[in-house]
Image (tube, rainbow, N blue to C red):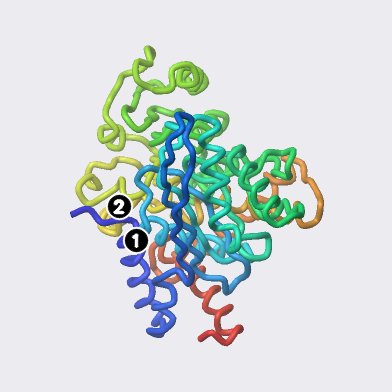
Amino acid sequence: MKKNAYEVALEVLSNVAEYMNLEDHVYEIFKEPMSQLTVKFPVKMDDGTIRIFTGFRFQHNAALGPTRGGTRFHLDETPEDVKALSLWMTLKNALNEIPNGGAKGGVVVDSLTLSQGELERVCRGYIRKIGPTIGAWKDFPGADIGTSAQTQSWMLDEWETMNMHHEAGGISGKVMALGGSKGRAEATSRGLLFATRELVHAKGLEMPDLTAVIQGFGKVGWHLAKLYEEDGVKVLSVSDVSIAIFKSTGLDIFDVHAYVERTGSLRGYPNAQEITNEEMLEIECDILAPCAVQNVLTKENADQIKAKFLIEGANGPTTPEAEEIFIRKGIFIAPDIWANSGGTQVAHFERVQNLNNDSWSEEEVNSKLEKIIHKVFGEIYALHTKSNISMRQACWVKAIGTVVEAMKARGWV
């Protein structure tokens, strides 16, 4: 039976806890979010019917400061997913020197099936339910799968209306006019680009003329493909939820994106071969970047993966069993809590700008992001080589150590 994201997260946590000799009570604190809020709220649909939605907001650990994490609108959202994502957010913030704890939220809904009016009412209904638990100095939700700058702006407006004052830092990922940050749209993908460069350079290679396969062609996958192409990387294949396309000489990424904008799907794209999502993962390439959902690389397909570098654009795309196989094969992994931290980092930059009533240029945002990606890589790569542990273990050891230090200083443990 396939493991869910939370089971995978706990398996990694257990292994790292044993390596670090974590005390039992410290381990127990990490296993579960400290606050778990599940809500139900009614929304009037365009046809006049009332539909009841389920939402979540889990705050994993606040030792480092107010919690932060994205909000997913996804039909398959579960409490187990939110638990795993909130744990990963605690570690991601700690690893990347963001002074916040981890949280995650979501609503069980396919946002693509809603009209604009229905989507707005879902956003506002969700915020009314979780509103007392969030804010710039409590917990500030960001965007994730199924949400956008517009949904975040509706959420901010609802929260500010409830509290009768302006507080742009209460929600991140907003439109620019409401305090959003320049560079936010590409932030996760740009962080992945910087992470890829670090791994490639560590192996004595250069980006031009490398080949890449990108699973997922949404916000993260599209921007990453564009940035790879600008860096001279040849993108051989991209995918959406139903189909993948492949071209051995490299895709024209801008043409592919224009086609998807017109049709809503990769299906039927005329200038490449259609293949399955399973087949695209097994293409021989230099860089494989899973940028969709968790648990796509498993012990069942790991032996067929032919990439040299694995860049985890999604959260938890690799199971522990698959990772063991990749390490044996010499595949160099950029773990998710470091590699895809660009969105989280720029959301942090957004809050800093909001709290200071300031605005930074896109060049300044990107420069700060590149510096922190580079700094953290140096630290985890040194730990990886010195202690002979995996890159993922190095990330988790550094992150957990930071959170434990904060918990001890507070007298929690």
Give percent across and percent down for residue 23. Answer: 41, 85
Question: Taking 269 as reference, is 211 above or below it?
Answer: below
Label annotation for residue 6: 1
Left or right relative to 276: residue 100 = right
Q: Residue at x 51, y 68 (%)?
A: 399
Q: Which residue is mark 2?
A: 326
Of 162 and 19, the residue lying toward us: 162
Label annotation for residue 361: none
Q: Residue at x 68, y 60 (%)?
A: 136
Q: Name the image quarter holding the N terminus.
A: bottom left
Where disc 2 sits, the SS reads helix
Give percent across and percent down for residue 394. Answer: 45, 66
Give percent across and percent down for residue 147. Answer: 52, 41
Give percent across and percent down for residue 193. Answer: 54, 42
Question: Taking 275 as reference, is 190 above or below it?
Answer: below
Q: Residue at x 50, y 31 (%)?
A: 222
Q: Quadrant of residue 291?
A: top left
Which residue is situated farthest in the top direction here?
270
* Viewer-nearest of discs 1 and 2: 1
Q: Quadrant of residue 31?
A: bottom left
Instruction: Name the amino acid type tagged 2.
Output: Phe
Badge 1 vs badge 2, beta-carbon distance below 8 Å: no
Left or right relative to 205: residue 295 = left
Instruction: Name the amino acid type tagged 1.
Output: Tyr
Q: Residue at x 77, y 45 (%)?
A: 360
Of 115 and 78, the residue lying toward us: 115
